[in-house]
Image (cartoon, grey):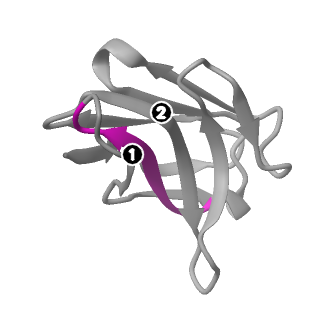
Amino acid sequence: VQLQASGGGLVQAGGSLRLSCAGSGSIFSIDAMGWYRQAPGKQRELVSVITSGGSTNYADSVKGRFTISRDNAKNTVYLQMNSLKPEDTAVYYCNADIKTRRMGARQNYWGQGTLVTVSS
């Protein structure tokens, strides 16, 4: 099982980016999917999470600016980031709880990270 993140890049403050993270391999089902970020010199922090049923949660710092969504048929989670600020600069990682078979246990997987740089 792999999670492949994409969509990062360099953007000016106030701009937008859309991150994608696609799961591949032997996937039976995916429960919660989410995005974390790690800025230089800081700990990794939760940005947003979405359950298999579509319930969402956001860090206070991104509420009203970021929107998480998912396409269960494509095993993909998205993060639409609007009104970006320099403090949003970080490596963004996707995360998912995945079952590889019906009676198997959920395992937690990380994507490789995609860099978002917001210039002032």
User: Image height check: is 48 above or below 38?
Assistant: above
Spot occupied by residue 66 in the image (x, y as percentages of width and height): 69, 35
95 part of magenta stretch: yes
Spot occupied by residue 103 in the image (x, y as percentages of width and height): 29, 34
Amino acid residing under circle 1: Arg
Spot occupied by residue 29 in the image (x, y as percentages of width and height): 34, 27
How far, Cα to Cα, is label 1 from label 2? Answer: 8 Å
Q: Nearer the viewer, residue 40 or 96?
A: 96
User: Image height check: is 2 above or below 33?
Assistant: below
Q: Nearer the viewer, residue 51 or 18?
A: 51
Rendered residue at 59%/35% (across/down) = 16
User: In the rendering, which numbered label is found on residue 106?
Assistant: 1
Spot occupied by residue 57 in the image (x, y as percentages of width and height): 74, 37
Q: Which residues are magenta?
A: 89-101
Label 1 Cα crowd, 10 Å radius (few <14 / some 14-19 / many 20+): some
Amino acid residing under circle 2: Asp
* Residue that numbered label 2 is attached to: 31
User: Image height check: is 73 above or below 101?
Assistant: above
Q: Could one spot residue 55 in this view of the protein?
A: yes
Q: Are marks 1 and 2 in contact (CB under 8 Å)?
A: yes
Tell which residue pokes out farthest to the top in this image: 73
Question: In the drawing, does residue 33 fall left or right of residue 107?
Answer: right
Rendered residue at 82%/52% (across/down) = 61
Rendered residue at 60%/32% (across/down) = 50
Question: In the drawing, does residue 62 fall left or right of residue 113?
Answer: right
- Per the image, label 2 sits on a secondary structure element best described as strand
